[in-house]
Amino acid sequence: MMTTDKTNQRANDICSILSKEQTKDSLIDSFSSTMDLLSDGVLFLNLNWEFEYINQSAEKLLRHDREKLLGKQIWQEYPHLVKTLFYEAYHHAHLKNDVMEFDEYDPAFDSWFHVKAYPKKNGLLIIFQDITEKHVAMEVVEESYRTLFQKHPDAVCSIDLDGNFLALNTAFKTLFPTDEKLFLGSHYLEFIPDELKERVKNIFNYAKNGKPQTTELNFTKEFKRPFHLFLTALPIIVQSNIIGVYGILKDITAERDSLEKYLEVSQMNELILNSVEDGIVGFDGHQNVIMWNRAAEKMTGYKKEELNLDIVNRIFKEVNSPLWTTDSTNNDEHGLDEKIIRVSDVSIFRKDGQPIIIEYVMTPIAGINKVVGKVYTFRDITEKKKSDELLYQSEKLSAVGQLAAGIAHEIRNPLTSLKGFLQLIEMSGEGKKEYFEIMKSEFGRIEQILNELLVLSKPQSINKEVCSMNSLLDHIITLLNTQAIIKNIYIEKYEYTEQAKVYCTSSQIKQVFINFIKNAIEAMDSGKIIVNLWEENDFAIIEIIDEGCGIPESLLSKVGEPFFTTKEKGTGLGLMVSYQIIEDHGGDIQVCSKEGEGTRFTVKLPIYSKD
Ligand code: ADP
Ligand code: MG
């Protein structure tokens, strides 16, 4: 605490008045009442340490009647003060003629006092205040600063204006687990690597001049691992004076590391995203496109910058609601249980308006507790579709080709009989009714066979329609009977249902059953082929059972693989195409075969229902 000249002056005045024996009573009275107005305690001890004067505030602070105290010796009245700072300071003031000023705690009063003691010729003038409240407040502030310093999660050090360490907090000692003594009293620059010295010095000097600074320090050589610190330098200001600098160090190695890793990963992701052949588009919950890779650009002809809501809707108009929002109204629909969805045979539209057929996989992007976006991975299957069709077509054509011989033969028979009858009519000159009946039925048969052949060789229409399996099988059997009869094979059909309606591309389904029955015929020398049809659990079940050579168990797994054939003129594609067609129709094929006994193919197709 500083003693100002003013207080000194005041003390002198008080003393001179007190010491004037001859002062008039009235003067003393007015002096006393003035002194009693002071909030500071004022008392005067004579050279024997006896109370000679006590003002009203002092009376309160001393907790004694002043009348009783006057003339008493202080050390007798307050023996607990003997040998305390009060005692020592008063004696010192006396002996050395020094003004003493101090704060001290009096345990008897449980109070803190601020005391000024002025040595005078005839005694000691003491002016004092109770500063307990102020002291407690100061202590609280000091304690909270101490706690803030010590418990701060970042490493904090205080440095004096010359650059020497004054104090380090707990986090600092954890960050640099060397002996604390090594730091304390040492200059901070001793611990800074050469290449960083200039920068840290600048920062320190700025802070020293009242300007807080921050910087990032990357230590490379000094530690075995990368080590990144974020340094803040703040001036330490006490009573408007800068007395030092606080250095606050935050270890940001983990953040830096994860930032670097993040950049690395995202660069890699970008690379992968752009080098895959599949188009990738990602939407967030606010209808924004967050991913659009190069393949997507190439396929659609749109660059990412060109995309907007309108264009996205135009490209994906046939994809079921590609966009969605995460607003409150449909949040529930996009819970975390949102599934991955696979869809095939959908068109998207290029910038030039051309459709491309794609198959896509939609994957939800999972955030915390909810889906925050969707990613579509799509593949152009236009070419694949074309080659699939070519495959179907070639298999069909080869079936047609192989059938042609039998058909030609079969057509020749009715034609021969027709020719014969015509000759007879010619010869007899009159037409017999039964000849004409036979002729009509034979012509009908030729017509039917030719119709079926035409259906098969026509370019495939992929339009689906509701077909009756019953009549579809009838048609096929009519067509194939021509070949079967040549080999003495009889095709018997048993239907246990009227219609068995199936929603299908009929030319494809026909192709499937032609192949099964043809295979059955080819597996037999003579005998019976049974075709069964019934309905079960919303499925039409068709069985083709032959008494042919059967398929050895070792080859059973190969059946259906492309180009697997045991026939000299076989393509090995028939079953593969059949499996694919039935699968496309949501159905399923089972084989059961025993070598030397025969084979049974069971085909399941979903029954068409109006809803
Ligand atoms: P391909 O008839 O041109 O050989 P498929 O794919 O139709 O081609 O048939 C593949 C093979 O499966 C046939 O070569 C034959 O070995 C076997 N296979 C198919 N169906 C039967 C059947 N009903 N009986 C015996 N083997 C069969
Ligand atoms: Mg075949």
Image (spheres, rainbow, N blue to C red):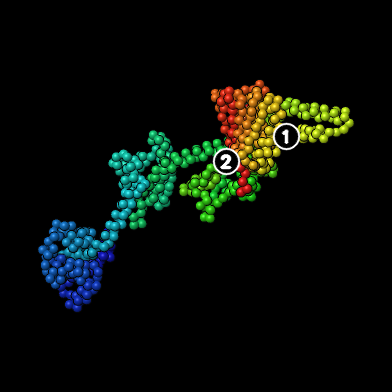
Task: Please say if 418 is above or below 198.
Answer: above
Q: Position of residue 249 (x, y in %)?
A: 38, 45
Residue at point 78% right, 27% down? 412
Residue at the bottom extreme of this rendering: 26
**Residue 10, visible in the rendered structure:** yes
Judging depth in this view, the residue of 99 and 215 nearest the camera is: 215
Quarter of the picture holding the N terminus: bottom left
Q: Which mark is residue 536?
A: 2
Q: Position of residue 345 (x, y in %)?
A: 63, 40
Residue at the top extreme of this rendering: 568
Q: Residue 406 falls in which quadrant of the image?
A: top right
Judging depth in this view, the residue of 39 and 9 nearest the camera is: 39
Left or right: 69, with 269 as reference point:
left
Residue at point 61% right, 30% down? 545
Residue located beneath label 1 in the image: 452
Residue at point 60% right, 47% down? 320
